[in-house]
Structure formats: structure tokens, C-alpha cells
Amino acid sequence: MTSSIPPAFVFLVAAALVLLLPGGSRRLLVPAVPLLGGINLWFVWQGGGALEVPLLDTRLTLLRADSLSLLFGLLFHIAAFLGAVFAFHVRDRLQQAGMLLYAGSALGAVFAGDLITLVIFWEGATLGSVLLILARREPRAVRAAMRYLVFQLVSGLLLLGGAIVVIGDTGSAAFGHIGIDSLGGVLIFVAFGIKCGFPLVHTWLTDAYPESTPTGMVFLSAFTTKLAVYALARGYAGTEVLIPIGTAMTAFPIFYAVIENDLRRVLAYSMINQIGFMVVGIGIGTSLALNGAVSHAFNDVIFKGLLLMSMGAVLHQTGKINGSELGGLYKSMPQTTGLCIVGAASISAFPLFSGFVSKSMVMSAAAAEGYWIVWILLLFASAGVFHHAGIKIPYFAFFAHDSGIRTREPPLNMRIAMAMAAILCIVIGCYPAWLYSLLPWEVGYVPYTGSHVLVQVQLLFFSALAFAFLNLVGLYPPELRSANIDSDWLYRRLLPGAARRIEGAVAALSAFIREQSTRGLDRLFYAIAQQNRPGGVMARTWPTGAAALWILVLLGACLVIYYV
């Protein structure tokens, strides 16, 4: 037992208070909650242990404080604070409640020591996140939120079903290493994979996240997928099938991101790309690989949050987010431009920026374990990241051409949040020992070696050269005024189209049957009417003998049928 309060409770109580407090108090409460939660987390960190409560014939572990959960707990507090500062100007009660419910549920899942508690907070995170999409209050956002909700509910049902099977097989609800050797393990693995954005079940992310509010996507990028990364690291470390899955995740989003016009959707694809590195590290399963996966998750929340904050600021100030409609904003938003470039350098793994000290751990682990094809593909993916996130985002938003838009810098709170994230990106990149000291497994990695720095600088240089060349000769994909979809074509185009065709065929068949039935009945009624008219068969006078004869025939037929 421990006297510390489970970190989730601080956020969930505050989410309930948001529904009651007036506007000014709510605005102060939202950023204060992560600070109060951070103080509580310090006591949890010092006290360790676990908090259990009885439920029927089992015990729920609401607080399991070990090195892995504490690292993600710290990360989620930082993300919640940065997001709350960025959204300080927001007065929408729905968004404020959704932010706190979402962050609190993610923390509850991270510190859950059993599968039942995990399921409860897993669904809480779904509810909180969908509120942030609905908060935009536009028809497109509502439709995207409903599609998003379907994926998340399927994930929750699979997790619940897998938990029931695992508990029935093992007699224990403890959430530890699970593996894919049993039906329950496979169901939970798929549940985690949906939330992680595995290929073919990733479209909820690129579909719904960009439809949220300018501040909402900052929160969305921090919790759902990173919670899934945590869950995979907890339950499936060393599961080799994750290696090809993660490798595919690093590669395929590059092609969609390069042709995408919506810059927030570019970052959504980039999110899948970065999660792929984490999934590969978890699949390799060595200490170096796992440390690389969780440290890159830590860094990704910060630098991806910074990029999304900069794009959210652009959307907030201009009302536009398509690359074809932006450009030249460096003239009126120089501070936002500079902060965005820090995020771009970090995600591209420039030396002295945070991405450099974590992404390379996964790649080094792949090389150390002999996964050379994987290493080559990860190298290609790293170059692709620089193209679509490191260059494309700042270039098309701020420099590509002068769109004629003249605006001002975003509100002060937005700039403060971006500045804090940028400082973290630089501090972690320059002094990685601080982050390494928090990692769950023993660290013996040195990022700043001559060979590593030289290889990375060469990679970035030639990638930038390729971008410049393709752009100059007109071969780089232009910013088209269009929306791109990938595997969601199956349920956004194919299935609705097939349903409409089937509905049309059924309607045509039904109309044909009704028409033929009506014609047949009309002919029958006409024939009956004809027989009852004067001169018809039914209008004649029949002799009694004929009637008796027909009665005998019918009775004989009945006897034959009965005995046969």
C-alpha cells in the first residue's frame, strides 16, 4: 500500500469541477492541474509501491509505480501542462473537460497494474479524445469523430475480450508480459495495435486528428498512441512480429505525407512514421532497443507537439492549414517560424536536438542484432522524415511563396507553450544524460560519436539536396487542392458505394416484384369477375347431381392423401 494519490484522480476530479466552475476559474484550473499532479507524482516517485482495492474476488491495482510507468507518467504530465498552456485562451467547457478527462484516463492506464483497471481507463481515454474532435462543431469533424469512435470502441472490445480470456486461462488479472502465444494475448495485441496505428488500422489517426480544434490535436498527439506504445513495451517486449510491422509504419506514411496538402495531416502521417521506430525497438526487445523506443516516445511527444502547436497557431491566426494556401508567413509570424524550425530540426534528428539522441538508439540496436535490411529501411525512413516534416512543414507554411496573408503572432500563451517545448528539445539534445537517467533499463549508449554525427549530417545534407533539386526542376509533388485517403478508401468509398448499389438493386427488385404481383392479382381478379358475370361459369345453374359428383371427387382425393 502507498499513501500517494493515483495520478489519474487529480485530473479526473478536475474534469468534474470544470463542469461546475465559471469560465475564468476553469481557465486557471486547466494548467494548474498538471502542476498539482506533478507534485503528487513526485511523492509517487519517492514512495513507489502499489495501491490496491478489492473488487469481488479479485484486487484492482490502481497504482503501480515502477520505472516504466513513472517515465510515461512524467511524460504525460509534461504533455498535459504544455497543451494546457497552449490552450489557455480556450473558453470552451467541452474542450477543457475533454482535455482533463483524456490526460487523466491516459495516466490511469499507465499506472494500472491489472487488466481490468486498464480496460476502464482505456475507454475513458476514448471518451476524452472524441470530445476534442467533436469540440470543433463542424459536420466534417462530427463525421470523422464517429469513424474514430468506431475504431476506438473496437479496440476497447478486443481488449476486454482478451482480458477475459487471459484471466480465465491464468487465473490472474495482472498486467505484465503477455505475448501472442494464446488467444487472449492475440486479442489484446490487436487492441494495442489499433490504438498504435498499425498499417491498415491507422486511418482513424490521419482522418480524425486533423479535424479537431487547433489546440485539440496537440493533446491528441500526446496520449493515445503513446499509451499504446507503453502498453506494447509492457506486454509485448521482444515480440518479433513487431519488427516488420514497425518497419512498415516508418516507410509507407512518407509517400502519403509528401503529397498531402493539409499540413496537420502531414504531421499525422509523420506521427505514424515516428511510432514505427518505437514499435521496431519494442520488437527487437534488447535493453538498448527498448530504451530507444521509450526515449523516442518521450521526445516525440515534445517535438511533435511543438510542430502541431506551430501549425495550430497558423490555423488559429489565418483560418487556413493547406500548404497551397499558405506561405510567406515568416514576415508576420517570425517567432512562430523560428520555434517551428526547432521542432523540425528535432524530428529530423539534427545533432544537438532531441530526436538525435533517441532515434539512433533504435537504429543502433537493429544493426547490433543483425537486422540490416530493417536498418536500411529505417535509414530511408529517417531521410523521408526530413523531407516531409523537417522541410515541408516550415517551408510550405512560412517560406514557399508569398500567399499575401498578413497576420500577427498568436496569443502569448501559445508562444510560451511553444517556447517551453523548444527549450526541452534543445536541452535534451544537448544533455541527453538527463533523459537517459530516467530510462527503465540500463543505458550504456553514447550518441555523440564522430561516426554517428558524420553519418547523420551526411544523411540530412543529401536529403536536403534532393529536396532542393526536385523542387527546382519541378519534380517535387505540388501542393494540390485535394484530400487524399489511403486504406480508409475501403470504408469511406468502397463500402458506401457497394451499399448504395446493393440498396439500388434491392429497391429495383422490390419494385419489379410489386409490379408483377400487382399485374398478376389484377389478372386473377379480372378472371374471377368474368366468371361471375352473366354467362360465366359461376353464374350458371348447376344440377344437383353435378354438385354431388364434385363432392365425391374431393372426398376421394382427401382419403387418398390421408392414406398415402
Image: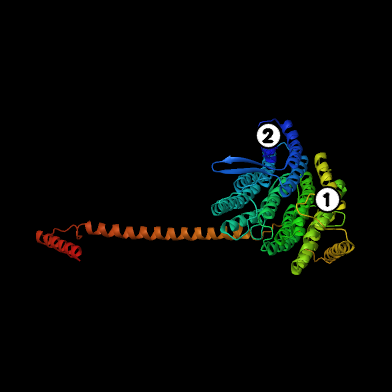
Q: Which residue has dot 2 on it?
A: 18
Place of residue 254 in the rendered image (x, y in percent of width and height, measured from the top left)? 74, 61
Question: At which x and y percent is residue 236?
Answer: 66, 57
The image shows residue 280, relative to residue 63, as above or below, that is: below
Asked if the residues shown at circle 2 and circle 1 are in contact, with their CB atoms under 8 angstroms apart, the answer is: no
* Residue type pointed to by label 1: Cys
Quick check: 90 above or below 381?
above
Q: Is residue 54 left or right of residue 364?
A: left
**Quadrant for the C terminus in the image:** bottom left
State which tag comes first along the sequence, 2 or 1: 2
SS label for mark 1: helix
Residue 370 coordinates in the image, percent (x, y): 76, 68
Position of residue 282 in the picture relative to residue 156 (left or right): right
Q: Nearer the viewer, residue 76 or 43?
A: 43
The image quarter containing residue 384 is: bottom right
The relative height of residue 381 versus residue 166 in the rendered view (above or below) is below
Circle 2: element type: helix
Q: Nearer the viewer, mark 2 or mark 1?
A: 2
Report whether residue 336 is seen: no
Image side of residue 300 versus residue 224, left or right: right
